[in-house]
């Protein structure tokens, strides 16, 4: 094996280990509260030595920051490209709603930790997280504005509609459970109709 594949393999292993640490830490923060969890607790939960944990993260706050990035920067990278796709503003908004909810489903614990523990971030990290959130809001507002201009959306104020839409979508992580007899697919499509068809006033097919 040449040096390049070896380096690539090490990079992949490091990335996977960091993801495991972040996911496990999020569950631990959610169960016990950020203030009551130490680096040793996180290392034990992951099943690694403390020194190995410090190889990836220098402090607990850095782990919390990484958790918060999964629900701010990550959706910017994964969801927002859908708004640049072909199609009407209503169809692109529908695609975003689906992606947003499925991302929240996958990152439910991280989202709840971010909501409750954001104040524990350093000012610099908090500013970056807020920047990702504002950018996401701005892109959603832009597509709603486009829909208003095209006549698809009937809301009177794009900014107010943006806050309403995102608040409704983000509330999904607080109540949805797999054991409540509701299909994720059905809930996602129900939200598309509620958000795009009812709140924004679009009519017609949204698939």
Image (cartoon, rainbow, N blue to C red):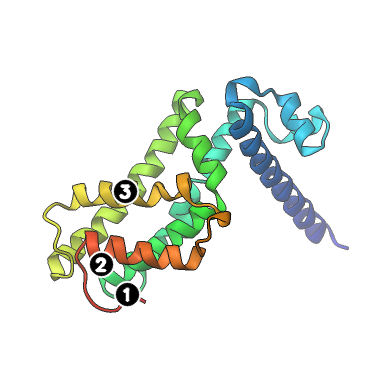
- The reply to whether callout 1 and callout 2 are in contact (CB within 8 Å) is yes
> Horizontal and vertical percent for residue 157?
14, 51
Kindly give the residue lying farthest to the right in the view shown.
1
182 left or right, relative to 61: left
Residue drawn at (53%, 55%), measured in percent from left and top? Answer: 180
Picture quadrant where residue 22 is located: top right
Where does label 3 land, which residue? 137
Q: Which residue position is annotated with label 2?
A: 197
Q: Nearer the viewer, mark 1 or mark 2?
A: 2
Q: Looking at the image, is 190 positioned above or below residue 132?
A: below
Front of the two marks 3 and 1 = 1
Say which label, 3 or 1, has the lower sequence index: 3
Of mark 1 and mark 2, the one earlier in the sequence is 2
Distance, label 1 to label 2, CA atoms, is 9 Å
Alpha carbon of mark 3 to alpha carbon of mark 1: how far? 21 Å
User: What's the CA distance linking mark 2 and mark 3?
Assistant: 20 Å
Mark 3: give few (<14), some (14-19) or many (20+) Cα within 10 Å.
Answer: some
Q: Which residue is mark 1?
A: 206
Q: Could you say whether the residue bearing mark 2 is in a helix, strand or loop?
A: helix
Residue at the image point whose x is 44% and y is 37% from the top: 129
Question: Which quarter of the rendering shows the C terminus?
Answer: bottom left
Residue 51 lies, with reference to residue 19, above or below; the image says above
Of the 4 image quadrants, the one containing the N terminus is bottom right
Q: Is 128 left or right of 23, judged from the image as shown? A: left
Mark 1 lies on a secondary structure that is loop
């Amino acid at each position: 094996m040449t040096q390049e594949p070896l380096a690539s393999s090490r990079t992949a292993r490091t990335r996977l280990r960091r993801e495991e640490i972040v996911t496990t830490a999020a569950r631990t923060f959610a169960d016990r509260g950020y203030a009551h969890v130490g680096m040793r607790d996180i290392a034990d939960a992951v099943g690694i030595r403390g020194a190995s944990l410090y190889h990836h993260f220098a402090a607990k706050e850095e782990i919390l920051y990484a958790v918060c990035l999964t629900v701010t920067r990550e959706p910017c990278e994964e969801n927002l490209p859908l708004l640049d796709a072909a199609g009407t503003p209503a169809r692109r908004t529908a695609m975003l709603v689906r992606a947003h909810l499925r991302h929240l489903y996958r990152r439910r614990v991280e989202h709840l930790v971010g909501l409750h523990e954001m104040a524990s971030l350093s000012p610099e990290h908090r500013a970056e997280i807020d920047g990702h959130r504002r950018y996401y809001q701005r892109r959603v507002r832009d597509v709603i504005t486009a829909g208003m201009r095209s006549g698809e959306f009937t809301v009177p104020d794009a900014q107010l509609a943006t806050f309403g839409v995102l608040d409704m979508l983000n509330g999904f992580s607080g109540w949805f459970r797999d054991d409540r007899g509701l299909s994720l697919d059905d809930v996602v499509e129900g939200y598309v109709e509620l958000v795009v068809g009812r709140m924004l006033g679009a009519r017609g097919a949204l698939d």
